[in-house]
Every structure is written in structure tokens, then in C-alpha cells.
Amino acid sequence: MPKEFRTYEASKLLFAVDDLTSVFHALWPQRARGNSKEQVMMPKFGLLTDPLQLVPDEILRFKRLGFDYAEIGIEEPMATPKILTRQRRRILKLLEENEMFAIGHTAYWVQFGSSHEKARRGWIEEGKEMIQVGSQLHLPLLNFHFYGKLGRVGDTQQSRNSFLDNFSNAMKELCKFGRAKNVTLMLENVPVGDFGTGGIDSYSAVIESVPQLKCHVDIGHAFIEGGMDRIRLYLTRFNDKLTHIHIHDNHGELDEHLPFGAGSIDFKKVVKWLKEIEYSRTITFEVFTSYRDAVRSREYFKKLWKAI
């Protein structure tokens, strides 16, 4: 990997530049110039750390498997903010020595839309602690999930509106905090259909109300939500704010996190659509069956990318 992608150099750039959009283009340029025509560069590939494993061990494993970066999960039991803070120097040293970079990921069940004010304030403060850890680890990106499974919330229009207002206000506060810490936040879609607080329109309402919030599209989640058409809609509707992607397979009902070909997603179409929108940033292979399956899925993706 070229030196400019090394975590130490990337972190210095991130901390020195106020306009993070220009930083993203510097780290993950959208096009590669050839002799006769421009072609979309292949994205950078990574894996999400297992919360049952120590992050330093995962970094070394990901390097041996040939991945470009680690998506560090800030999640119990083995990667809480306190544990990661203690491991900070070790993590940064390993990333630099192995010429890798890292981005951040949080648990899906963090709640920002609740009308229970004390509970929501507690989660916002927890979110700030996660951002603080991300800053200490020089993570340019950190995700939160658009999670809204709160009993019967969303069964009425009033409760749906209240949830969306609460979630949007929480994201505005956290994005402001993140900007001060040089951490850009992105929102991941979750595998919920168009009912209650779920679906692309609810997700879009939050994204549109928080200008600093970037989009993190999970391909498998979008497929559960509405099939191949929904995947394409997420990629095209949010192209301008699309910053990161998760990819894995499933059968359209459960969030199975299967390797490519074990489910029903047409990855030829996915790759074609990614190239159409000139996406060349980061893609994390959230294949949870085995590391070997994740590597095989990555190699299949590369083969499709070169062929299409």
C-alpha cells in the first residue's frame, strides 16, 4: 500500500485539514487515470473486528489475510472504550507498522430515538465517549446505526415523528462533537422494512436533516428491506453522501451475514451499480461464517470488479 495510506500519515492529514471532504478524496480518490480513459479505482477492503477478540490480534490477522484496513468495533465485551483506551498505543503502532488504516463501528442497539429523555441523554453521552475513543485511535470515520426497535413506537404518525426528531437532534449534537474531535460520523441502514420507524424514507429524513452526517450503506440490510431494487435506490439516492459500505449475503429475510453465493443477492448487479456511481472508498466484508469465507468473498468481488 502506498505510504499516503498509512495510518500515521493519514491521521496527520486528517488532524491538519478542516475540510474533511477533501481529506476523503485524498485518501480514497474516486478515479484512476489511465492512458486512454478514466476508470473507477477498486475500493479499499477491510474486516470488522470481532468483539470477542482483542483488537491488536485482529489487526495482525487482517494484515495476514491481505486486507487494507480494520473496522474497529467499539463494543463489549473485548472492545469497550476503556479497553481500547488502554490499548491505544499498541493499536496505533500495529497499524503504522503494517501500513494499514482503521475506521470505527459501534453496536447496532445504541438508542438515539427514544422519548425517554434520561435514557436518550445517557446514550448521547455514551456516543460521545465512543467518538472520543475514535479520536484517540485516529479514526477518520465512525458509524452509528439507524436503530429504532422501541416497542410500538412508529405505529402512529406522532410517535414516528417524535422518534425521527429525537434521532436527528442526537445526530446533530454528536456530529458537532465529532467534528471537534476530527471524527466524521456516518449512519448505517438497518434490516427493517417500510413500517414503523424503519425503511429508506425514515433513514432519508434523518440524513437530510443533518448536513454533516454521512451515509453508510449496508448492502445486505438493504436487500432485506426491499430486494435488489432497494439496494440500487440506496446507492443512487445517497450517492453524494455515501462514504462507506458493508457487504455480505443473505436470503432476503434474516441478517445472516453469509459469504457471497450462499444467499440470494446478485453481486454482479451490485458491482455494476457501484461502478456506475464511481464508488471507490471503503468496503467492509461483514461475512461472519469464517475468515476464509470473507477472503473468498473479497476475491470474488475483485474478479467481478475487473470483469464489469
Image (cartoon, rainbow, N blue to C red):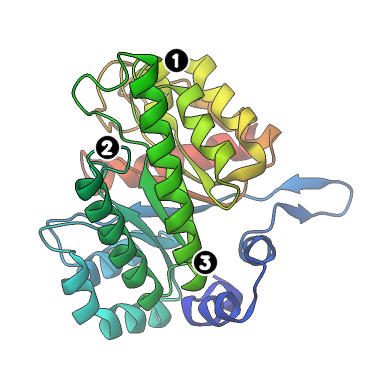
Q: Is residue 142 left or right of residue 30?
A: left
Tag 1–tag 3 contact (CB < 8 Å): no
Q: Name the residue that disc number 2 marks.
A: 114
Q: Is residue 33 depicted above or below 233 in this figure? A: below
- Cα separation, mark 1 vs mark 3, equals 35 Å
Position of the N terminus by quadrant:
bottom right
Residue at 28% over, 16% down = 253
Q: Could you tell which of marks 1 and 3 lies nearer the N-terminus? A: 3
Whole-percent x, y for residue 7 in the image: 47, 76
Indicate the secondary structure of the residue bearing disc 3. helix
Determine whether label 2 and label 3 are within 8 Å by CB: no
Numbered disc 1: secondary structure = helix
- Disc 2/disc 3 C-alpha distance (Å): 24 Å
Image spot of residue 221 (x, y percent): 37, 28
Place of residue 33 in the rendered image (x, y in percent of width and height, measured from the top left): 80, 56
In the depicted structure, whether residue 71 falls above or below residue 208? below
Left/right placement of residue 32 relative to residue 182 reads right
Q: Which residue is mark 3?
A: 179
For discs 1 and 2, the disc positioned in front in the rendered view:
2
